[in-house]
Image: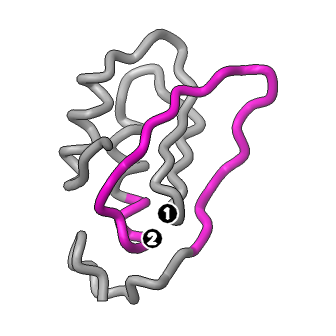
């Protein structure tokens, strides 16, 4: 069972929820620690998507990689706070 978010899914559930990133742009990239299931990924995706100007959020469960595009620079502290709100941390 997932112990990160206590959602009750199997921790081996690695359902790929990745979306393609727009071609010709340089996405921001971070590593998120502590995720163990698709629900964890959804929580991080939801919080980061809520940041003003952020779009095309992709969270890869197997690598912990978080990438996104944005209309303007997004401070590291803002991303860190969103990930923390979801219950996780940046590496």
Colouring convention used in this rendered image of the protein: one colour
Image quadrant in which the N terminus is located: bottom left
Residue sitting at 71 percent across and 20 percent down?
25
Most extreme residue toward the right is: 23
Q: Which secondary structure type mostly characterizes the magenta part of the structure?
A: loop
**Residue 46 location (% of width, % of height):** 38, 48
Residue placed at 24% from the left, 23% from the top?
77
Do callouts 1 and 2 mark residues in contact (Cβ within 8 Å)? yes
Mark closer to the observer (1, 2):
1
Magenta stretch: includes residue 62 = no
Residue under the image location 54 percent in, 33 percent down: 68
The image position of residue 82, as x and y in percent, is 26, 38
Query: Secondary structure under badge 2?
Result: helix
Looking at the rendered image, the quarter that the C terminus falls into is top left
Task: Judge whether 17 appears above or below 74 on screen.
Answer: below
Task: Give the crowd class for mark 1: few <14, some 14-19, many >=20 residues within 10 Å.
Answer: many
Residue beneath label 2, please?
Answer: 38
In three-dimensional space, the C-alpha distance between marks 1 and 2, rounded to whole angstroms, equals: 7 Å
- Classed neighbour count for the residue bearing mark 2: other residues with Cα under 10 Å, few (<14), some (14–19), many (≥20): many
- The location of residue 59, given as percent across then percent down, is 51, 51
Above/below status of 19 relative to 2: above
Residue 26 located left or right of residue 24:
left
Relative to 83, is 59 on the left or the right? right
**Toward the viewer: 89 or 15?**
89
Give the residues in magenta: 15-42
Toward the front, the furthest residue is: 91
Relative side of 6 to 14, left or right:
left
Q: Is-magenta flag for residue 18?
A: yes
Mark 1, residue position: 61
In x, y percent, where is residue 23? 80, 28
């Amino acid at each position: 069972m997932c112990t990160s978010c206590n959602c009750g899914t199997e921790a081996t559930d690695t359902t790929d929820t990745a979306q393609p990133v727009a071609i010709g742009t340089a996405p921001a990239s971070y590593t998120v620690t502590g995720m163990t299931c698709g629900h964890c990924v959804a929580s991080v995706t939801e919080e980061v998507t809520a940041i003003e100007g952020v779009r095309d959020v992709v969270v890869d469960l197997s690598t912990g990689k978080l990438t996104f595009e944005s209309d303007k620079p997004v401070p590291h502290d803002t991303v860190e706070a969103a990930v923390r709100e979801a219950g996780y941390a940046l590496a």
